[in-house]
Each structure stands twice: as structure tokens, then as C-alpha cells.
Amino acid sequence: MIPVAHVIPEFAPWLDLAGLAVFAASGALAAAKRAQTMVTLAFFALVTGVGGGTMRDLLIGAPVFWTHDSRPAAICLIVAFAIWATPERWWKGAALDWFDAVGLAAYAVYGAAKALGYGIPPVPAFVMGVVTACVGGIIRDVLAGEPSILMRPELYVTAAALASALYVVLFLLGAPIAIAAGVAATAGFTLRAAAIHYRLALPAYRGRR
């Protein structure tokens, strides 16, 4: 097992909490758009915010992060209440998509780094980065009855994969941790931002008649 401090930069936990807040907001908004109660908004915010990290921790044998730290659940509940108490017009537009892009990249890097810190080999660690960034959104979509992000052609999971893979590669090449995290997160965000702005998508399967 590699000491976590050797694979995760000191500022990463704060980026992790910021990403969690963004994902929690997307979950709460999914419930708000359906005129649900405060309790439902809070539930959606929590499962979306902590879903990916919970799956990652269970798979790598780490203590589930939000059961040992009051901040993640508190942030999810605060975000849910803020959305429930404010007008819908405040949350319209593409702003949340851009915040989500930041959270996606940060979560992917943090997930891969934490997996490396728990002795997970490079390829599974890369997968854990993608899991951390995407599973919460998958759970949100399933609960909301929307098409899963996995079934959309837009570059979403691909951006998380880029950030996670690049961090693992740079780490294995011996790059300074802060630089590896910054470069990887920036690359993942840039790809996701380009997908949002230019509506980029992967080619669809063409083998069907």
C-alpha cells in the first residue's frame, strides 16, 4: 500500500468536497424538476453526491468516506435545502453543466489517486476513478427515470476516463503529484467543456441494419 499522502495532493480533499456539492446539486435538481418534497430532494442529493465514492470505497476495501466524516452528508443536505428554498429560475441554463464538468474531472482524479493509495494496481485504479466520477449520476438517472449517462453519446464518461487515466500514467512516470493531478483534471474538464460547447459525441454503433 502506498501512503495516501504520496498519491493525493494536499488540496485534493477540498476539490473532492466541491465536486460532491456539484453532484449533490444535480441530484436535488432532478427531484426539484419533478416538484418533489424536501425529503426527496435531500435523498437525491445524498445518493448522487456520495454514490460514486461509496462504490469506490467498497471495491477497494477502504472505510466508506462519508460514514467517517460529517462534512459530505452535511454538504449534500445543505445543497438540497438551498435548491428547495430558491426559485427554479436560479438554476436554469448551462451553469450547472459547467460546474458538473469541474466536479467530474476532480472526482475522477481523486478516485484514481485514492485507489492507488490503497494498493490497487494501475488499471483497476483507473477504473475506480471513472466509477467515482460517474456512478452517482447513474444512480440519479435511474431513480429519476431518465436515460442513463452511460446510454448517451455525449462525451461524459470519456472525459472522466481521460482524467483518471492521465493521472495514473503521470503518477507512474514519476511526475510531481500536484502537477499530475492538475494536468489530469484540466484535461478531463477541457474535454467535457468541449463536448458541452461543441456537442461532441462518440460515433454510434453502425452494425445494425
Image (spheres, rainbow, N blue to C red):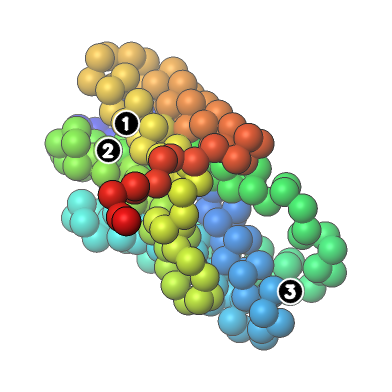
Q: Position of residue 120 (x, y in %)?
A: 17, 40
Q: Nearer the viewer, residue 107 or 12?
A: 107
Instruction: Give the labeled residue for mark 2.
Output: 126
| Closer to viewer: mark 3 or mark 1 | 1
Vertical side of 36 occupied by 83: above or below: above
C-alpha separation, residue under disc 2 versus residue under disc 3: 36 Å
Q: Position of residue 107 (x, y in %)?
A: 45, 44
- Which of the two discs, 1 and 2, labels the residue nearer the N terminus? 2
Residue 11 seen from this side: no
| Quadrant in which the N terminus appears | top left
- Which of the two discs, 2 and 3, labels the residue nearer the N terminus? 3
Whether pointer 1 and pointer 2 mark residues with C-beta atoms closer than 8 Å, the reply is: yes
Give neighbour class at mark 3: few <14, some 14-19, many 20+ (Cα, 10 Å): many
**Callout 1 amino acid:** Ala
C-alpha separation, residue under disc 3 versus residue under disc 1: 37 Å
Residue pictured at 24% horizontal, 60% vertical? 58
Vertical side of 31 occupied by 147: above or below: above
Q: Which mark is residue 165?
A: 1
- Which of the two discs, 3 and 1, labels the residue nearer the N terminus? 3
